[in-house]
Amino acid sequence: MKKIAHLLLGRFTIIACVILLQVAWLVGILYLFSNRYSYVMMLVRILADIIVLVILNKWANPANKLSWTFLVMVQPIFGLAIYLMFGRSGLTRGMRQRMDAANREVAKHIAPDGDAAEALLRNDRGVYNQSAYISEWAGFPVYRNTATKYYKCGEEMFPDMLCALRSAKRFIFLEYFIVEEGYMFGEIEKILEQKVKEGVEVRVIYDDVGCISTLPPNFYRRLQSKGIKCAVFNPFRPIVSVVMNNRDHRKIFVVDGTVGFTGGINLADEYINKVERFGYWKDTGIRLCGEGVWSLTVMFLEMWGYICRQTEPDYTVYMPSANRTDEFSDDGFVQPYGDSPLDHENVGENIYLNIIGKAERYVYIFTPYLIIDHEMLVALCNAAKSGVDVRIVTPGIPDKKMVYLLTQAYYAPLIKAGVKIYQYTPGFIHAKCFVCDDEIATVGSVNLDFRSLYLHFECGVWMYRSKAVMQVKEDCLETFACSEQISYEFCRNRRLPVRMLQSVLRLFAPLL
């Protein structure tokens, strides 16, 4: 009964009802006036034509433009109502100006490591070009003097996260899409409280939509009352900000500027398998120790400055002290990166495409969702057709059934081209990893879906010849062994109603 009451009376349900009422009211008003006054329908159609021209004139993904154009032209009244409420993915002008100000401030404090870039160039010109793209277009340099450790599940990473928190002397920064009250965050919160008492600066950022069903509305006040500085990204107010599709999907964990974690793991119990939701929950993470953590630190400070409308008086106080830099070990090349939906540069997707294009022997991929645009589909198919061993692991048990059905809708063309698709039999795989040719890997928060690739703030770590690269590969091989390989016949033998539904879902995939 408690779960049912929480579902019916929870914030998510209430907000969903408010949104549905708004849509129904707007659509109802338009239909009422268009049926009563013929000129209103004519005005609606003219407005629909104008909106379609605006959509087509945008520098946006063609699949996204096609979906909105189809919806607006086929059902002008409903399509216009939905577009006006959900179609505008950008932040307001004021919010953009604040983010630009934060970007400019941060750019002053990220200096490229020329020695690392030159060493990478001497190793491999093609790999250097991939790194140069991240440096030039994402603004985050490549580092050496950074040790890496890969985690193949949340419960493996969690003890090291707690250990890092207990060792904090100066500051702790946490930025997460999902935070949920329970064992995992409870243990973290206890340490944060103690560290505040010891004089450590503690800051927490969480996304309001990501936590809409996991935290009470004013949870940040509870943390603030304990001395923990807390900020909420893009608070979700259904009447005011329903057009705000951009969310903070990053997972950033930084201690003293010398230890950092990222990956797919949020701060909720299913990520460490303390509770079971969809079978075994497989997620992955990466720990950095060394100079490369500075980029994660800067990403956090940038987001904090945007949310709180303030810039740090001196970013350098969060840099590792000079005597600590001598302690850092050298573990290949490491390049943390962030991706923003505001710069019209699809950093996360382009890094994935560069890895696929660079592959000569194999590229292995973990993703919870496989909802890709034409460019990614062609890149994967061409790599497989060229003899590259391309393997993708998706969930065996879905978290969202319609999204799962949509993911499976992309199997057929990939399998036909020679891509091997596996479904993770033990449960749900939430990991976002690429590994290629025993040399390059990336671990982060970026899903292979339209929301991650085009609408969300994301982050990840690109690595070349680091220890974690082979650790990712070993995890992939173990995961293939306990997963089911999907055949082309599986796709062909789906029932006609299922295939028709999948076709419709693919048409509207960019809007989901």
Image (tube, rainbow, N blue to C red):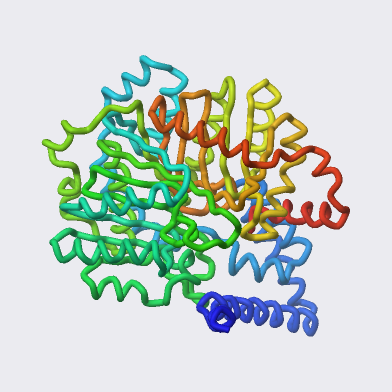
From the image, which quarter does the C terminus lie in?
A: bottom right
Of residue 57 and residue 98, the one placed in the foreground of this image is 98
Q: Nearer the viewer, residue 59 or 335?
A: 335
66 on left or right of 360: right
Given residues 337 and 49, the one toward you in this image is 337
Percent position of residue 107, x then y = 28, 43
Which residue appears at 34% of the width and 51% of the height?
Answer: 159
Q: Quadrant of the N terminus?
A: bottom right
Where residue 196 appears, as percent x and y from the top left, is 18, 64
Q: Could you say where residue 206 lies in the image, as x and y percent from the top left?
A: 39, 63
Q: Is residue 101 visible?
A: no
Q: Does residue 21 appear anywhere in the picture? A: yes
* Front in this rendered view, residue 308 or 84: 308
Q: Is residue 325 left or right of residue 360?
A: left
Say which residue appears at 76% left-offset and 74% top-offset: 41
Q: Quadrant of residue 180?
A: bottom left
Could you say where residue 310 lies in the image, as x and y percent from the top left? Answer: 25, 61
In this rendering, the answer to whether 266 lies above or below 136 is below
Q: How many marks?
A: 0
> Residue pushed farthest right?
496
Q: Residue at x 72, y 71 (%)?
A: 77
